[in-house]
Amino acid sequence: MTQTSQLPAPAEDPSADPAAVSGRRGPRVHRAWLVAVVTFVTIVGAAAFASLPGLLIDPLHTEFGWSRAMIGFAVSINLALYGLTAPFAVALMDRFGIRRVVACALITIAIGSGLTVRMTQSWQLVLCWGVLVGLGSGSMALAFAATVTNRWFAARRGLVTGILTAGGAAGQLVFLPLLSWITEHHGWRPAAMTVSIAAVAVVPFVWFLLRDHPADVGLAAYGATEFTPKPPPSRGAAIRALRALRDAAHTGTFWLLAGTFAICGASTNGLVKTHFVPAAHDHGLPVTTAASLLALIGVFDIAGTVASGWFTDRLSPRRLLAIYYGLRGLSLMFLPMMLGDSIHPSMVLFIIFYGLDWVATVPPTIALCREHYGENSAIVFGWVLASHQIGAALVAYLGGVARDAFGSYDVVWYSSGGLCAIAALMSLVIRHRPVVAPAVAVAVAG
């Protein structure tokens, strides 16, 4: 005879109690939130160098006579390396720790941005801004936020991802008006030095306040039911990153996520962040005003991304992605009719509508990576992010080519809107992977 018997409750494990591990009473506010704050501030500081490329196009074209396509090519190298570095950076964080990798990345950015003030040839722009700043920024890409969230949070992951992702928008809000004012009144070189100084200023903050793992301070992750010891350093970072790519590439979900996120990058960093200011200036809008509008997108982006994180914890991520891409494509289709030599209600409507959608795609994309790829989800998201930046790099370059060839950006806006519609359809094709609940009963022979 076979009967089902409920398993007895397991004996309480002292290691499951963070207070027992640390030998003291657990803090009222979990340390994970402090780590999240440090990560947020780091991403805000990182937004300084992400805000500058769109402001460099006209000044560099005027001073050196370089074509917009040439300048766009340097920006495209930056964007491509930003993405391609991310999965390797995640593996390096597992090997050497988050603090060391992020601190080295900030120093690399400071050097690259600082050296641009001495350049006289276009290849130097590609080396300094494209390669050095691209490598440094890629080490602090959104995969950095995904790594911190996976290690420190077992609950509220969608919300935390949304908040950390919004750090980029918050930094854009802070730095874009400042850098545009500096560029217009003092030239692009002081603006580049401001980026360099901002990168250096964040280093002590990261080094002294950021921690690699909850076990470093004797705590379980926020929302976890048991304490998890810190895993040993993972060797072979490059091999692990490539192995994760190989395994993920055998699944259709990976290619759908990579394809949609490539379109995401093309329609945000590659198009709007790089070409919105010069496109608005083509219509007679002052550069400072155009940069302020781009910064205003960041205000609504913060609200939209945090809300997206909250929705991701409660709704289907793939359906959220379909809605986000569909609405973004619609807004880009109407943008050429809204640009003018002054701010008017339809332009404000675009700023609000597009801003709410700017990076709202990140929390559901990370959630789908976590759902399908488990412990390798941060690295897999790094590869998905690489596709995001490749899409951004292509449009950053092709946008400049289109402007040189046609005298306007209209064809780029319409093409990007169409791509977003395709991304919406691709999102709906992604399959849901059900989470298998742990068994609570066992069969006992009798």
Image: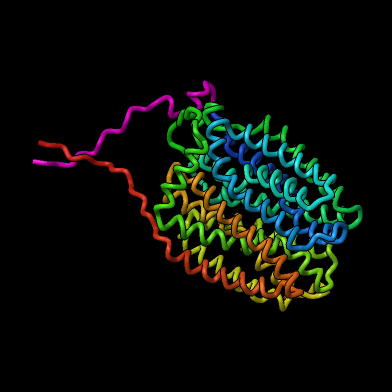
Please tell me whether residue 378 is drawn above or below residue 29 in the rendered image: below
Residue 308 rendering spot, x and y as whole percentages: 56, 58
Residue 250 in sight:
yes
Residue 216 rendering spot, x and y as whole percentages: 55, 27
Q: Quadrant of the N terminus?
A: top left
Please tell me in which quadrant of the rendered image residue 333 appears.
Answer: bottom right
Q: Is residue 9 located in the magenta-colored stretch of the structure?
A: yes
Q: How many marks?
A: 0
Q: In this image, 249 relative to 301: left or right? A: left
Name of the residue lying farthest toward the left: 1
Residue 170 rendering spot, x and y as whole percentages: 71, 52
Q: In this image, 223 relative to 287: left or right? A: left
Please tell me whether residue 376 is drawn above or below residue 342 in the rendered image: above
Please tell me whether residue 418 is drawn above or below residue 54 in the rendered image: below
Q: Quadrant of the C terminus?
A: top left
Q: In this image, 353 relative to 201: left or right? A: left
Please tell me in which quadrant of the rendered image residue 244 appears.
Answer: top left
Range of magenta residues? 1-25
Name of the residue lying farthest toward the bottom: 337
Please name the residue shown 63% across and 43% down the image: 140
Please tell me whether residue 390 is drawn above or below residue 289 in the rendered image: above
Please name the residue shown 65% across and 63% down the image: 395
